[in-house]
Amino acid sequence: MTNENSTASAQKKVITRFAPSPTGFLHIGGARTALFNWLYARAHNGKMVLRIEDTDRARSSDEAIEAIKDGLSWLGLEWDGEPISQFARAARHMEVAEELVAKGQAYHCYATREELVEMREQAQKEKRPPRYDGRWRDRDPSEAPVDAPYVIRIKSPNEGDTIVDDKVQGIVRFPNKDLDDFILLRSDGTPTYMLAVVVDDHDMDISHIIRGDDHLTNAARQTIISNAMDWDVPVMSHIPLIHGPDGAKLSKRHGALGVEAYRAMGYLPEALRNYLVRLGWAHGDDEFFTDEQMIELFNLEGIGKSASRFDFTKLENMNGHYIRAASDKRLVTAIEDILGEIEGGDFYASRMTDDMRNKLTTAMPGLKERAKTLLQLIDGARFLFEETPLPVDAKALKILDKDEGAGRAILSKLYPVLFATDDWELETIETATREFTEQQELKLGAVAQPLRAALTGRTTSPGVFDVLAVLGKTECLKRIEQQMAKA
């Protein structure tokens, strides 16, 4: 039996689905899967359905469902229609299982737990994979003890291969002898994942399945169920998983975190989208794509067969590109949005007045040239939020104390010049400072370095004239006075 894209399938409206299990946050691999499904649907004027595969009631939670939806929304991957609960469709899954029995494509299996353990132990002795031996496949249910519990198993083909025509992996053959008569309905009447997925995909008119290649074997079993029901098999695309930089399976130390963690680390959603689309998909050597370009160019043929390697350095560089491209007001808003999620965020949030927003917006051109994440932006802007007495780090102190306090001596001479500057605008401040530098026969750096240290408490910042203008005359003079007092 083959999984081929029939003419009828090809004419179907493109409907993809993202189907996470709500047992935790939206992790980065799931985010990429959602992105690929979203892009393919948008590229073909189709829809992406969000299906919550919550049949594992012990591990599923409402909190996880909300986290997944929040993660998708933050990434800008909006789904179509209301999210669908797989658990809520259990009655429909049971109906299909019984229909398969009625069609002779499935059967009631009364094998006991002890018999199954014996089968497994025998397989281990014979050094072969454990599989159900089909003992109830052709037996009459009347042979079973009265009221004995049973499961429903599919009648898998005994011979030949099940073929998956995968748009990424190519033609993949699965010997039917290795697939056995797997369970569709458990003895308590609950459907297995394998059955639920096929029924839901059919009922929701899913045309294309794009998911991780760890589901490739599942594709064979799901094809068997679809064929048994005479249903079209969706077009399959199994994408390689994401690995760490060392080639090992992606773990938390590599970056296998929830999307919310990347948000709290200061990444912009458009940067993360761009980075994720390049993990496993390519369009020539292009690196940067707008959403419109991604939608226009994305195709299944561009997905590679090899595992992608997650690289924080590349992600940071890409994020820096998007930070520099973002508007100053957008970055201020993005900073405010994550203050409640980061360590020390309360310090900034408590000082975020309208006046501070204006100062931060004004300082942003100089700040974003040096930052690759929002956290670096926040850290670079700390001097705006500090109050006198200003904390001064070791490097800045070294500049101020150098040559027996020569830096502070320069500030003492510069102070009256700045005090006398009434028009506190960038050009006026710069002109007055440069004239002072020339009069003192100093290089600009000899003045700018101790001035920056006094104003920001650090050795790096936006341009020192920008700092003077943003802080305002009163605050600048207070900070310089603080260092003059230590001379």
Image: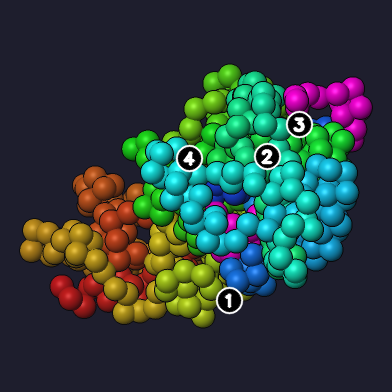
Q: Is residue 393 above or below residue 235?
A: below
Q: Amino acid at mark 1?
A: Thr
Q: Residues within 10 Å of mark 2 (few under 14, many from 20)?
A: many
Q: Which residues are magenta?
A: 1-27
Q: Secondary structure at mark 4?
A: loop
Q: Amino acid at mark 4?
A: Pro
In front: label 2 or label 1: 2
Q: Which callout, 3 or 1, points at the residue further toward the start of the chain?
A: 3
Looking at the picture, how far across and down is residue 143, in whole percent?
74, 57
Q: Is residue 347 left or right of residue 50?
A: left
Q: Amino acid at mark 2?
A: Arg
- Locate residue 4: give its quadrant: top right
Looking at the picture, how far across and down is residue 352, in whole percent?
55, 74
Which residue is tagged 4?
129
Q: Which callout, 3 or 2, points at the residue further toward the start of the chain?
A: 2
Q: Which mark is residue 221?
A: 2
Q: Is residue 206 visible?
A: no
Observer-nearest of 66 and 149: 149
